Image (cartoon, grey):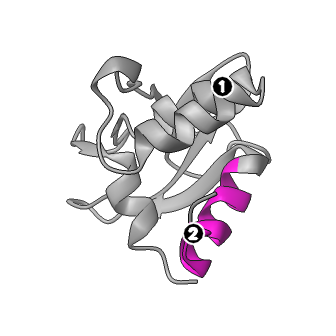
Amino acid sequence: MGRPPPPGLRADLRGRGRGEYGIGCPVCRSELFVAFHEEEAFASAGDHVTADPPRAPLLPADPERLDGIAPRLSGMARAAGRDGPARGLTYLFGEATCPDCGTVFPVSARVAERPY
């Protein structure tokens, strides 16, 4: 078995388990929520639970083109029979479009910049 992921990554994976993250748009700095749910995956400009803010669909990464730690995480999820988390990882390592300004950016880069 390999080394465990660093503490920050473990915290991020716990956030992924809930299916959503709060991040900021790298251009207009809008506070966004990205959500990976069974029925949909999207970025919203505001809290999608208590309101109906503008949304944009997330663009999943191609599982065959994942790089870095992503293929390992995806492979571990699939090997454990966890297809939902494996699918969610394609969104985590995919792209989001800011509903406010239209900027397309990598989700994982914004998640990695979150304070812990």
Crowd around label 1: few <14 · some 14–19 · many ≥20 (10 Å): some
Q: Which amino acid does label 1 sit on?
A: Arg
Specify the label residue 3 is tagged with: 2
Work out whether 68 lies above or below 63.
Answer: below
Per the model, the C-alpha gap separating discs 2 and 1 is 19 Å
Q: Is mark 2 on a helix, strand or loop?
A: loop
Q: Mark 1 points at which residue?
A: 78
Residue 79 occupies which quadrant of the picture?
top right
**Direction from residue 17 to residue 112 in the image, left or right:** left
**Helix, strand, or loop for circle 1?**
helix
Does the segment drawn in magenta span residue 5?
yes
Residue drawn at 65 percent across, 68 percent down:
10
Q: Is residue 34 visible?
A: yes
> How many marks are shown on the rendered structure?
2
Which residue is pictured at 76% across the width and 27% down the height? 82
Q: Which amino acid does label 2 sit on?
A: Arg
Tell me the mark number nearer the camera, choosing from 2 and 1. Answer: 2
Screen quadrant of the N terminus: bottom right
- Toward the front, the furthest residue is 1
Residue stretch rendered in magenta on the structure: 3-16
- Image-based side of 23 in relation to 47, left or right: left
Residue 19 occupies which quadrant of the picture? top right
